[in-house]
Image: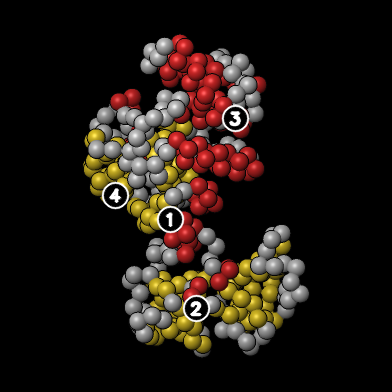
Amino acid sequence: MNEKKSVSVTLEHVTKRFKDVKGKSDVIAVNDSNLVIQPGELVTLLGPSGCGKTTTLRMIAGFELPSEGKIFIGNEEVTMLPPNKRDTATMFQSYGLFPHMTVFDNVAYGLKLRKVPVEEIKVRVEETLAMVGLADYGDRAPSKLSGGQQQRVALARSLIVAPSVLLLDEPLSNLDALLREQMRVEIRKIQKTLGITAVYVTHDRVEAMSLSDRVVVMKNGFVRQIGAPSEIYEAPNSRFVAGFVGKATFFPVKVKNHDGKLWTCILGDKEVVASQAGENVAVGDEAVLMARPESLRVVEPGKGHIEGTVRMNVYLGNSLEAFINTSFGEVLVQIDDPHAKKVYPEGAKISIDFAPDRVRLLENNED
Ligand code: ATP
């Protein structure tokens, strides 16, 4: 149904300032943001509450105008255009369905506004409802649908106008965990099938990681890192990104040597080797060694790099998380096979071993 060519979305030095409630000092919601979203790409804006995700999305949609900078959809500059002059459709967290209209009429609404002929509307609504798995629900009232079904109607309503860019603002946060997972997969399938460019706002890292071609991690209005999910998880450029996109333990180390390939650092009275480091790390620095739970191994006492005691084992079905007390604080280790004979019980003295190619040196700052 979408015969258009996919388009890119570009933000050039986009800043958005709001006055505070007294109209005095400025809140900088988005600070000099630069972003190129490729045609057909699904990019997620991820970050803690208040970091500027929604404001960025609203500027792409035209509900907010930038204080500085330019926005392009394809080659067309849209910075100051109103929402209805942009080729975008936005799906919000609240479904915003019209309760007095049937599902069919809700979905048809955008086409009626555009004065599309009745026959064409019928065909397109039926096509779109089938796409979201609601072929037989056209006559229902929205109140007679489950939350997940209402969300599908909202998605159909956004898609039917065949926008070049689909903007989604936490669209699944009102759904329970299972439905969220199902809808996530469906949104991704539909977006790929249509080849539509999509921007998705969430503060849920699992959602961002599982849905996106690339993730934009934001904090305090700044873009902190842009990369494929595997890139931001495995090669975060800061402690903030590392901690926000996944579980990690940060060990304080002193960087002793770099031989061009491997970094040697001092952790307590032991040497630990890392094969990766963030851009600004240098020999002589006090840095942190970032270890994901799956990058560490629990071994017999004395056989690893640091000693500890198992405080708690948490069974997760396909793996187990061991919380280990050490002199560097609590360390989280993932044990892949919870049924293996060698699971150390709570209270056991153990040692933790680092896999050099799986740990990463980062600057020691909270940012
Ligand atoms: P959340 O996940 O909580 O929705 P967010 O990352 O989407 O957060 P934004 O809604 O973009 O964040 O807000 C960014 C900053 O801009 C916040 O400090 C917010 O208080 C401020 N802000 C947003 N909209 C306005 C407004 N209309 N007037 C004043 N300040 C605003």
Q: How many C-alpha atoms fall within 10 Å of the one at disc 1: few (<14), some, or many (≥20)?
A: some
Of the 4 image quadrants, the one containing the N terminus is top left
Ligand 1 has an atom within 8 Å of the beta carbon of the residue at disc 2 = no
Q: Give the image location of residue 278, x and y in percent.
A: 38, 70
Q: Residue at x 64, y 73 (%)?
A: 324
Which label is found at residue 351?
none
Ligand 1 has an atom within 8 Å of the beta carbon of the residue at disc 3 = no
Q: Give the image location of residue 151, x and y in percent.
A: 56, 31
Residue, disc 3: 133
Q: Give the image location of residue 44, x and y in percent.
A: 44, 47
Circle 4 or circle 2, nearest the eye? 2
Of the 4 image quadrants, the one containing the C terminus is bottom left
Q: How many C-alpha atoms fall within 10 Å of the one at disc 3: few (<14), some, or many (≥20)?
A: some
Circle 4 or circle 3, nearest the eye? 3
Q: Earlier in the sequence, mark 4 or mark 3?
A: 4
Which label is found at residue 228?
1
Residue type highlighted by circle 1: Ala
Q: Earlier in the sequence, mark 2 or mark 1?
A: 1
| Disc 4 from disc 3: Cα separation | 37 Å
The vertical placement of 296 against 203, above or below, is below
Q: Earlier in the sequence, mark 2 or mark 3?
A: 3
Residue type highlighted by circle 2: Pro
| Disc 3 from disc 1: Cα separation | 29 Å
Residue, disc 4: 34
Give the structural element (helix, strand or loop) at label 4. strand
Residue type highlighted by circle 4: Asn
Q: Are marks 4 and 1 in contact (CB under 8 Å)?
A: no
| Whether residue 326 is visible | yes
| Disc 2 from disc 1: Cα separation | 23 Å
Which label is found at residue 356?
2
The vertical placement of 62 against 192, above or below, is above
